[in-house]
Structures are given as structure tokens and as C-alpha cells.
Amino acid sequence: MNIMNKNLPGILLSAGITLLAYLLSPLIPGKILGETLFALLLGMAFNPWVSRQESFDSGTRWTSKIILRAGIILAGITLSFSQVLQAGRYSLILMFFTLTTAFGVGYLCKKIFKINWKLASLLSVSTAICGGTAVATLGPTIRAKNRDIAYAISATFLFDLITVIAFPWIGQLMGLSDTGYGLWVGTAVNDTSSVVAAGYAFSDAAGLLATIVKLTRTLFIVPVVLIFSWIIARKEPTSTETKKIRIQEIFPWFILGFLAVVGIRTTGIVPALWVERISFLSKFLLSMSLAAIGMNTSLQEVKSVGMKPMVAGVIIDTSVVIVSLFAQAGILRYLQ
């Protein structure tokens, strides 16, 4: 009960900003900003004030993590297993190209910009897998400095901020279909929240597909962390004791919840009206998490990041964006 009381102010504020986003978004001509993206931007606008109010800190951080996962889990209510398996199959093919690009370009950036291998690895895994979550998970595994972890997360945030705003417009200008855009965003955008924002800003169908593809990418955090735990043991064999890697601690368990909801939907026992209501709730919860993320994001912190790792991160991200775009176009053309 004490934990809930501590989190309640931040949760209610996130919900209030999201409600404001839902009320104001339809007033913008051409639906340039969807509710999810609008909630993120409103949250960022509130950051200077919220950052001075300690009473909101715990609740907004809880919302940005737990509510985000709850929204993703409930998003499965509109999907069947056949749709999930089909999207997952496409994303696995795309990930061959994006993983190779992320770590290959990351290695070149390490050489060109004289960046230490730990920072270069964090930038690459952020782009290849799941943004800040991957950085936060891998950082302690390779015993990266806090500075390097902060650099990687900041570079990820900056590029994600650009993609969330630009990708829906680019997708429309290029005439991408919901399928093509969803595959592109799901493999090219870093953080889960940014994938959700950029996907749903285009269309609900694209947002759902992008989320499925992103969840498939997220699963790769397990083998990647295990591989890097072996690498650090080889590179620094005389260093201090390495923390034991436990799969149950790094596995994204909320994906199982998502699949459980998909299974319930596949049975057909959920009435169409409730499917629609739960789908709306899912999108609202996702928007709430984005509002909370925005409130926890300080543009001043991003400005303080050094230029070299930032440039390297943008180069890695841009390379993956381009490769992913051509790869998904090739896959869809082949299927036709």
C-alpha cells in the first residue's frame, strides 16, 4: 500500500497528460501528431517542472516501465497466433541484416573515432536489440563505466526522438504500406516506447506489427548478453569477480503475457466489443508510459553528451535504418 501511495501522484499525472493528448490531438490538422507521440512531447514539455517535484518521480518511473509492459501485453488482444508467427518470421529475416549492420558499423566507428570497445558495443547493441534496456542490461555485464552507459543511452534517446517525429512523415512520403512501415519501424527504431510511438503515429495496424517485430528483437537480448559475458571473461580474465548471468533476470517476461493474450484472442471467446475496448485501453496505457518517459527526459542532459559517441551512434542507427528499409522492401517484393 505504501508503494502504491508513493507511485500514485506520478501515475495520475501521466494519465492526466495522456488524457490531454487525446483531447488535443484531433484538433491538429491532418493528424500530424498521433495521441501516443503527442503524449510523449507533452511529457517532455512538463519535464522542467516535474523534475523539481520529487513526489512525481517514483510514479512516473514506475509508469514508464510497468504500464508500458501492461500496454504491450494487452495489445495482443487484436492479434492471432498466425499473425504473430508471420510477423516474427519476417523480423527474424530482417534481423540478420540489421544485427550484422549494427555490429559491423559499430566496429568501424570504434576504429575511426577511437572509441573504447565497451562504448562501441553498447551503441551497437542499443541499435540492434532494444535501446536503453539493452544498454542497461549489457553495461554491467561488460563492466562498462557509468559514463559510457550514459553516453549510449543519450545517443539512443536523441536518435529515437528524431525517428519518432520523422518516420511517420517519411513513411507517408514514400507511400509505405502498413506492413512495410511496421516492419521498417520494428527493426530500425531502438527503444520499445519509441517503436510504439512511431508505429501508432502511422496507423494502428502498423503500430501493432511494429510492436510484434520489436518484441522479437527484444528476445535476442538473452543470447547477446551471454555472448558478451564470454567476451569480457576472455578480454579481462584477471579483473574482479564477474557477476553471474542469470537468464531469468534478463529474459523479457512480459512477452509471455503478450503471447498469453494472443492465445486468448485466438480462441475467439472474447466478444468483439471487448476486443475493441481492451485495444483502446492498451493504446491509452502505451500513451501513458510515453508521457512518463517524456517527463523523465531532460534535454539538458542530452546536450552534455560528447560529440564523438553521439556521432558514432547516429551513424550506426542511420546505417540500420537504411539497410532495414531496403531489406523489408525486398522481402515484401519477394512474397508478392
Image (cartoon, grey):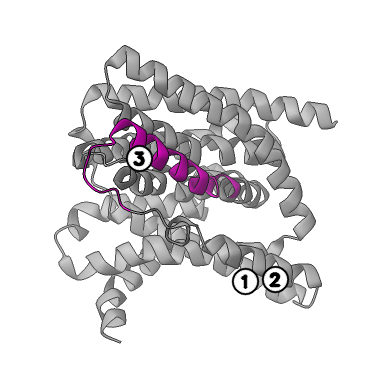
What amino acid type should be assigned to the residue bearing mark 3?
A: Phe
Q: Position of residue 222 (x, y in %)?
A: 50, 49
220 in the magenta segment: yes
Q: Which mark is residue 157?
A: 3
> Which residue lies most toward the left here?
52
Magenta highlight range: 216-243
Check whether the beta carbons of the residues at disc 3 and disc 2 lie within 8 A of each other.
Answer: no
Q: Determine which of the numbered discs, if any, sits on residue 278 in the image.
A: 1
Foreground: disc 3 or disc 2: 3
- Residue 130: x percent and y percent? 47, 44
Depth check, front residue: 301 or 128: 128
- Marks 2 and 1, how far apart in space? 5 Å
At a point 71% along the width and 36% down the height, the residue shown is 177
Closest to the camera, between mark 1 and mark 3, is: 3
From the viewer's perspective, is residue 8 above or below residue 87? Answer: below
Return the residue at label 2: 275
- The kind of secondary structure element at disc 2 is helix
Q: Element under label 3? A: helix
User: Along the line of sight, which residue is nearer the eye, 304 or 90?
Assistant: 90
Q: Are marks 2 and 1 in contact (CB under 8 Å)?
A: yes
Question: In the displayed structure, would residue 122 be above or below residue 320?
Answer: below
In the image, residue 289 lies at what x, y percent? 41, 60
